[in-house]
Amino acid sequence: MTTIDAPAQSDTRVQEVFDDVLTALLDAITRHRVTWEEFRVVTEWLTEAGDEGTEIPLLLDVFLSPTVDDLAHAGDGTENNIEGPFYVPDAPLLEIPYVLPQRADEPGEKLVFTGTVRSTDGSALAGAMLDVWQSNGLGEYSQVHPGVPDFNLRGRLTTDERGRFEFTTVIPVPYEIPKSGATGRLLTALGRAAFRPAHIHFRITHADSPPLTTQIYFEDDPWLDADVAASVKQSLVTALDWRRDKDGRRYATCAYDFVLARRTGPVHPSA
Ligand code: MBD
Ligand code: FE
């Protein structure tokens, strides 16, 4: 998000940061005495990553954006967490009772997610909008993986007058970065697992607060401590509580209370 009085990126800023990036890369090349053959492999790999279209954002999200996100932490309220590469704007505006769009035979187990949105001063934020997106019970995202209908498990909903919300979805599963793409091939070469723990993404907006982009994780997920993107924050982990409906079918509930910082400074019309 930019505001009217955000300073323009100055050339000195680019020079300073790029100089350090270049120094670090040249230092690695020198220390490891990188050969022409290796250099060509890297050139081809980067070219392929660019050609694949979605691979550069994925690569940056796995290796770099968590640190940028940590630096962006506002200090108050719910911890922010990276947006990741798979956000799609303009998800369907849902109606009560909120159910994330899904197929009749959607794989996965039913989850009822409840919670509240409050301000750091404790007041309920009525009419806060939650833009929610997640992978399905097979670890696939709509608009990313083929064969999944557009906007499947993506939707927008709002809090009631007491700042509460409830939506039904399916429990996401750990997400594995495809091994076939440039990022997956690098992870294979590194001997590193390519999993993220199961998570649901949220982007929460309200007129009185700066937007919050975060993710919610689930207790006992085997990948919480081995996230390929190293992005899990303990304060964002919630527990699944298993229940049975009146027909005896198993489903899970979970709860999370989000806290948004107060808006400081002028409100930009596009915010
Ligand atoms: C994801 O689903 C994700 O959230 C991140 C951060 C990186 C890769 C895939
Ligand atoms: Fe994700």
Image: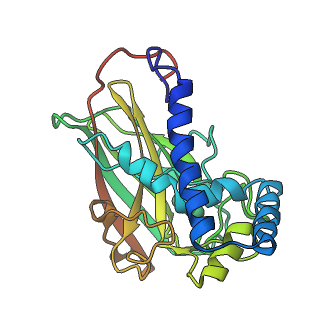
| Camera-nearest residue between 238 and 62 | 62
Q: Position of residue 160 (x, y in %)?
A: 34, 37
Q: Residue at point 51% right, 72% down? A: 228
The correct choice, above or below, for 168 with respect to 197 in the image is above
> To which quarter of the image does residue 212 belong?
top left
Going by the image, does 239 lie left or right of 141? left
For the view shown, which residue lies furthest in the left direction?
A: 121
| Camera-nearest residue between 200 and 7 | 7
| Camera-nearest residue between 124 and 20 | 20
Q: Residue at point 62% right, 42% down? A: 92
Q: Position of residue 53 (x, y in %)?
A: 78, 53
Residue 134 at least partly seen: no
Q: Position of residue 195 (x, y in %)?
A: 54, 76
Going by the image, does 180 lie left or right of 271? right
Q: Position of residue 88 (x, y in %)?
A: 64, 45
| Camera-nearest residue between 230 and 38 | 38
> To which quarter of the image does residue 208 belong?
top left
